[in-house]
Amino acid sequence: MATVDEQQERASRQEHDHAARVRLMFAGIAGRYDLLNHLLSGNTDKRWRRRLANQLRPALVPGTCALDVACGTGDLALALAEAGDARVVGVDFCRPMLEIARRKSSTIAFSIPFIEGDALLLPFADSSFEVVTIAFGLRNLADVRGGLRELSRVLKPGGRIAILEFSRPVVPGFRALFQFYFTRVLPRIGGIVSGSRGAYEYLPDSVSRFPDQKRLVEMMRETGLAEVEYQNLTGGIAALHFGRLPLLQS
Ligand SMILES: C[S@@+](CC[C@H](N)C(=O)[O-])C[C@H]1O[C@@H](n2cnc3c(N)ncnc32)[C@H](O)[C@@H]1O
């Protein structure tokens, strides 16, 4: 039987291998990532990110800092910068995705630092941000709980967290139709346009393994977050979860 040390070593090796595979996969599709997002969702992805940013607007006041984790090509970070007056920072561990984000930010009025870093080991001190967001990133982490803990660690007491992620469609007939599109049609189109069918087979596969709306609420509460609530987007294809780090008890 494996000792506790051996089990921990195996778990950390698996996490490391998972992260390396995910990073390589996004590096391979970075150039086509935005195009495919908009094409495969009929531009709905833009609306979802804008909705997240608009709902956080009251927290994005001058003097505050917002961190977008797993920022990819930067669309949510840019939406946050547009929605309010907070200083926005993006972090991701895939350099080709970050390069696209930096190029976008250089062509607009907002200057957003896009930093290379791992969501499971963020390069920021505890309690650094009033707002922390992650869109379509949590599902990709080797350790979802560890990710929630790390996002909470860098959040200031009283700060808000928002998670945008694919979820479970709530209407049965629509769910079946969407499943057909998501598992049969999308990987084909994604494969043809990006040249990596594997990445677009990984998408529905990773969504099927990700906690549904209610389970994610529980996990957020277990992490110590309060005021946790969610909204279904487009019938539950995606969901927007919000939470708040409680103020320190005196
Ligand atoms: C599906 S993309 C989402 C990008 C962006 N947030 C958006 O809304 O389009 C997932 C991103 O998560 C990043 N990612 C996955 N695991 C990560 C980790 N452990 N640390 C940092 N970034 C990670 C990938 O590099 C990729 O850019």
Image (cartoon, grey):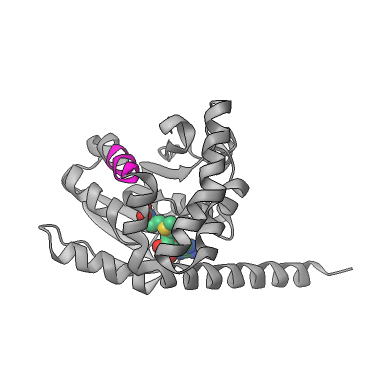
Residue at 17% from the left image edge and 47% from the top image edge? 82
- Residue 200 visible in the current orientation: yes
| Image vertical order of residue 185 relative to residue 73, above or below | above
Q: For residue 6, what is the image quadrant?
A: bottom right
Q: Is residue 120 visible in this depiction of the protein?
A: no
Residue 173: x and y in percent read: 56, 27
Position in image of residue 47 (x %, y %): 29, 40
Residue at the (34%, 54%) spot, across then down: 68
Q: Is residue 3 left or right of residue 75?
A: right
Q: Can you give x and y, in whole percent of width and height, for residue 102 in the image?
A: 23, 68
Q: On the rendering, which quadrant does ligand 1 occupy?
A: bottom left
Determine whether, in the image, residue 3 is placed left or right of residue 115: right
In the picture shown, does residue 153 fall above or below 54?
below
- Identify the residue at horizontal 84%, vertical 69% (top origin): 2
Decide whether residue 64 is among the magenta residues. no
Q: Nearer the viewer, residue 125 or 236?
A: 236
Q: Main secondary structure of the magenta part?
A: helix
The image quadrant where one finds the N terminus is: bottom right
Counting the numbered discs, the total is 0
- Whether residue 9 sits left or right of residue 28 in the image: it is right
Q: Quadrant of the C terminus?
A: top left
Residue at 23% x, 42% y is 60
The residue range painted magenta reads 43-51
